[in-house]
Image: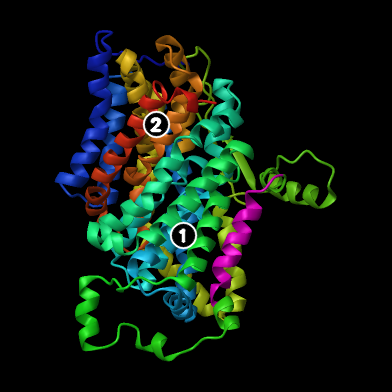
Amino acid sequence: MTWTQNFTPITDNLVLSSLAALIPILYFFWALTIKRMKGYIAGITTLLVALAVAVLIYGMPAGKAVMSASQGAVYGLLPIGWIIITSVFLYKMTVKSGQFNIIRSSVLSLTEDRRLQALLVAFSFGAFLEGAAGFGAPVAISAALLVGLGFNPLYAAGICLIANTAPVAFGAVGIPIIAMEGPTGIAAMEISKMVGRQLPFLSAFIPLYLILIMTGWKRSLEVLPAILVSGFSFAITQYLSSNFLGPELPDILSALVSLFALAIFLKFWKPKTIFRFASEETAAAVEPLYPAEAETKYTKWQIFHAWSPFLLLTLFITIWGMNPIKPALSGHYEGNNVFLGGINELGKLLTFQIEVPGLHNAIIGSDGLPIAAFYKIELLGAAGTAILLAAIVTKFIAHMSAKDVYSTFVEAMKELAKPILMISAVVAFAYVTNASGMSTTLGMTLAKSGDLFPFFAPVLGWLGVFITGSDTSANLLFGSLQKVTALKVGMEPVLALGANSSGGVTGKMISPQSIAIACAAVGLAGRESELLRFTLKHSLFLLLLVCVITFLQNGVLSWMIP
């Protein structure tokens, strides 16, 4: 039996229906920020609230609601949970083998200044990982690296989440932009150009904003030259690549240019004073912060050897995202290459697409068509598998015994059990929200803003990423609605689509999935509420900037629209 979504279930009133759709979201904020529940408890109870609203208010059959939750829970385990497990496992291997001491020393040799370390690791290196993999790997890896360097775990997680704003729209080899072409009919290249004329303003600002958060205005001015090199090299490359190459490479190219530009710049320029956190200054008054690193001089080969696990991670993730390798890993390759054909056969064996019982094609969406629903499990094609291969090779590079590798993996699994439970719960909540029509109700309400729609268009993207945890999902969820509404209010559709993607990046730092991933990576499971309170105000401020940019581009800056 099929069920048709009803977007105005309360007396055909859109406002009242929207208030009902907000209940699970408001509950989640209350549970984390006011009640301060542990993350996995907040996630599970939010899922239960969403199920209740879907069934009791939206009239969704209980069986279909539960099955949509199960579909989301599976996606929360793979690929998202798998990426977190393998990322933390790889990081722990470098720590246990002693290689991370050399990594820390190599970063300290560039700079001991915490401000500049944040720019190198959280902003540039994190953006590279976002461009290559996405799905939580950037925050997991870069936050763990900062903690290893000596950053406070909560601070490291928060900084990495905010830094991740710049690359999200082009994350995972341009998938968020490419995905929008299908449902909207607007070429991905045109959307890429539009996002590339919005996001660079934010990208140039983020490095300064990060340091302002860390140290305040006066201390930020001390490293302003480095901030300008980091931000503008990234923003300029992002604009050029998105407008002349397409959506696949802006993150990877921008991150590499920014990383190397800042590293080279630091060879010739140093800040007058070295900034450390207050707790470190107190400790340094008694004894050196890093006595071992201060006394040991490592060779270039030792430094390369220590960094090799993360270089391998970068290599494998990049290969996993390349065409035509990526479709072959998932069993979708259609070419004649014998080697890729062999990978394709293995990919088919390790890729499972199973219809969700009672849900597949059983819900009629807003377009009057049935909605497909699959449990999609890609064991070979998942980015987490690429990271696992890097970890396997690292075993031999670091000369670790099989026993140590096994104990490290078990240790990572034990630490991540509750965070992954939370992730599965919140992704299940997102799927219930979408399947019941609650997300569409909220989108329809924002679309009623008329002439002010250009200002509120980014809010749709922000809301979509908060709910789904993915800019790709938010673009798929609201792309068509953005286009239709833009045509009604006299706004260029490509501007509305760009606003959806650009606004979405500011919601990533408060998405329940992102919060859980960041906390898991730095060992703060159960303290998700603290991290959300840290990032929420920054998310809203950066969203406001995108809203203003979009509003101006619809008016006095309309010449910027491709």
Residue drawn at x 38%, y 72% is 149
Query: Residue 551 at what x, y percent from top left?
Result: 36, 25
Q: Which mark is residue 461?
A: 2
Find the residue positioned furthest to the left: 34
343 sits left or right of 66 in the view = right
Find the residue positioned furthest to the bottom: 295
- Of helix, strand and loop, which mostly describes the magenta segment? helix
Q: Dot 1 corresponds to which residue?
A: 85
For the image shown, how many numbered marks are present on the structure? 2
Mark 2 residue crowding within 10 angstroms, few (<14) / some (14–19) / many (20+): many
Front-most of residues 526 and 198? 198
Residue 457 appears anywhere in the view = no
Local SS, label 1: helix
Q: Is residue 197 above or below residue 485?
A: below
Query: Residue 66 at what x, y percent from top left?
Result: 38, 32
242 sits left or right of 482 in the view = right
Mark 1 residue crowding within 10 angstroms, few (<14) / some (14–19) / many (20+): many
Q: Which amino acid does label 2 sit on?
A: Gly
Instruction: Give the Cα separation between the discs numbered 1 and 2.
Output: 28 Å
| Quadrant where the C terminus is found in the figure | top right
Magenta residues span 306-323
Local SS, label 2: helix
